[in-house]
Image (cartoon, helix red, strand yellow):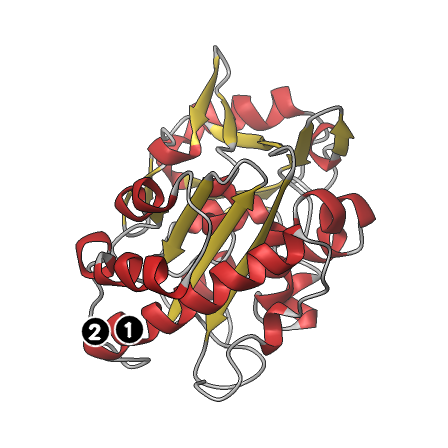
C-alpha cells in the first residue's frame, strides 16, 4: 500500500534542529525513529502529518548508558539494542523480559522504547517495567526542558502528557537495589501478538513490592492496593489469595477481539500468583524463563 498523504520529510542532525522544526509545525510534525507504528497509521489514514522529522542521524538521541544507579535510554534506541545489553538483563530484568515480547525480531530491530510509550496504547509492553522502576521521561521544546514521572505520562488511550511542540529525548530508569522483577505477558498464541494482559512484578529483599499492569484498563498503572497488602510480608498461598481478591478493584478491562473482560480478570489472578513466586525465585538466584511461565493457560 502506498502513502496517499503527501508530507515534507526532514532529516536533521541535532536536537536543536529537531526542536525548531517542532516549534514551526507543532502537532502536524511527527517524529520518525523506528516508524513501526507511525508508518502504518499514515498508510491507514489515522495520521495526516505535514512533516516527518527523521531523528536517526541525531547523535544525541542515540545514547544508551548505565551511570551508577540510573539507566538512560535515548529516543532512538531500539528494543533489540536493549535486549543485547547485559546490564539491562542484570539490573532491569523486568524490562529485559518486556523487550523480548514486543512484536517480532524484525520489528524489534527498529521499534523504540520511546516510540512505545508515545503510542500510549493500553497494551504497551514496556509500561509495567517503567512504572515499577519509577522512570522519568525527559521532554524538550525549543525554549524549555521538563521531566515527567512515568506515573503522570499516560493520560488516556493514545494520549500522553507530551505537548505539541515537545519531543521526548530519552528516559531515565533508576535501579531498585536488592530486587528482582519479571514481566508476565499473556497473548493468544506464541510469537507476535499484543497482550491480552500484562503484569510487571518486582520484589525486594526488604519485602517491598512493586506491581503494575497493562492491557487491563485505559492506561497502564501501578496496583497500589495490592502493593499495600503485600508490603512487608513473606509470600504465601493465603496472602496471594487475598491479593487476587483485590484485582477487580485494580483493573478495568474491556472485551475486544483478543479477549473478554471476564477472562482478563480471571487470568490476571493466575498471572499474579505465578509472577510473584517467579520474582521471588529470581531474587533468590534461580533462573526463570518468563516466556514459559504461563504454560498450560495461554
Q: Nearer the viewer, residue 154 or 59?
A: 154
Q: Position of residue 230 (x, y in %)?
A: 37, 46
Quadrant location, the C terminus: bottom left
Q: Secondary structure beneath disc 1? A: helix
Q: Nearer the viewer, residue 67 or 75?
A: 67
Q: Residue drawn at (50%, 78%), measured in percent from left and top? A: 294
Look at mark 2 in the image and give the residue it sits on.
Answer: 261
Residue 109 placement: quadrant: bottom right
Q: Nearer the viewer, residue 95 or 219?
A: 95
Q: In the image, is residue 289 above or below residue 14?
A: below
Q: Residue drawn at (74%, 38%), measured in percent from left and top? A: 57
Q: In the image, is residue 271 above or below residue 181?
A: below
Q: Is 228 situated left or right of 136 in this image?
A: left
Q: Secondary structure beneath disc 2? A: helix
Q: Mark 2 and mark 1 in contact (Cβ < 8 Å)?
A: yes
Look at the image and tell me whether residue 231 can be seen.
yes
Number of marks in the image?
A: 2
Look at mark 1 in the image and give the residue it sits on.
Answer: 264
Q: Is 265 situated left or right of 38 in this image?
A: left
Look at the image and tell me whether residue 59 can be seen.
no
Q: Residues within 10 Å of mark 1 (few under 14, many from 20)?
A: many
Q: Position of residue 131 (x, y in %)?
A: 45, 41
Task: Check residue 197 in the rendering and tell me which mark sits there, or answer none.
Answer: none
The CA span between labels 1 and 2 is 5 Å
Q: Residue drawn at (80%, 55%), measured in percent from left and top? A: 84
Q: Nearer the viewer, residue 256 or 178?
A: 178
Amino acid at each position: 500500500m502506498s502513502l496517499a498523504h503527501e508530507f515534507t520529510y526532514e532529516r536533521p542532525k541535532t536536537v536543536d534542529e529537531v526542536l525548531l522544526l517542532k516549534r514551526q509545525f507543532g502537532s502536524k510534525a511527527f517524529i520518525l525513529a523506528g516508524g513501526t507504528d507511525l508508518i502504518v497509521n499514515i498508510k491507514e489514514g489515522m495520521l495526516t502529518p505535514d512533516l516527518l522529522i527523521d531523528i536517526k542521524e541525531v547523535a544525541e538521541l542515540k545514547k544508551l548508558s548505565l551511570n551508577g544507579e540510573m539507566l538512560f535510554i535515548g529516543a532512538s534506541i531500539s528494543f533489540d539494542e536493549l535486549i543485547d545489553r547485559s546490564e539491562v538483563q542484570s539490573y532491569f530484568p523486568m524490562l529485559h523480559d518486556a523487550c523480548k515480547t514486543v512484536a517480532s525480531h524484525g520489528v524489534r530491530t527498529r521499534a523504540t522504547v520511546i516510540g512505545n510509550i508515545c503510542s500510549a496504547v493500553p497494551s504497551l509492553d514496556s509500561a509495567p517495567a517503567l512504572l515499577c522502576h519509577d522512570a522519568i521521561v525527559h521532554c524538550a521544546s525549543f525554549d524549555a526542558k521538563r521531566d515527567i514521572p512515568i506515573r503522570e505520562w499516560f493520560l488516556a488511550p493514545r494520549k500522553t502528557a507530551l505537548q505539541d511542540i515537545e519531543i521526548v529525548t530519552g528516559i531515565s530508569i533508576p535501579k531498585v537495589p536488592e530486587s528482582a522483577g519479571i514481566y508476565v505477558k499473556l497473548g493468544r498464541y506464541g510469537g507476535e501478538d499484543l497482550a491480552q494482559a500484562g503484569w510487571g512484578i518486582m520484589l525486594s529483599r526488604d519485602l517491598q513490592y512493586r506491581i503494575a499492569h497493562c492491557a487491563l484498563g485505559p492506561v497502564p498503572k501501578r496496583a497500589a492496593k495490592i502493593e499495600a497488602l503485600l508490603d512487608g510480608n513473606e509470600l504465601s498461598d493465603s496472602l496471594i489469595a487475598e491479593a487476587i481478591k483485590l484485582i477487580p478493584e485494580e483493573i478495568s478491562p474491556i472485551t475486544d477481539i483478543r479477549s473478554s473482560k471476564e477472562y482478563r480478570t480471571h487470568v490476571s489472578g493466575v498471572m499474579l500468583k505465578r509472577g510473584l513466586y517467579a520474582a521471588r525465585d529470581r531474587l533468590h538466584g534461580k533462573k526463570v524463563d518468563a516466556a514459559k511461565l504461563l504454560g498450560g493457560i495461554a
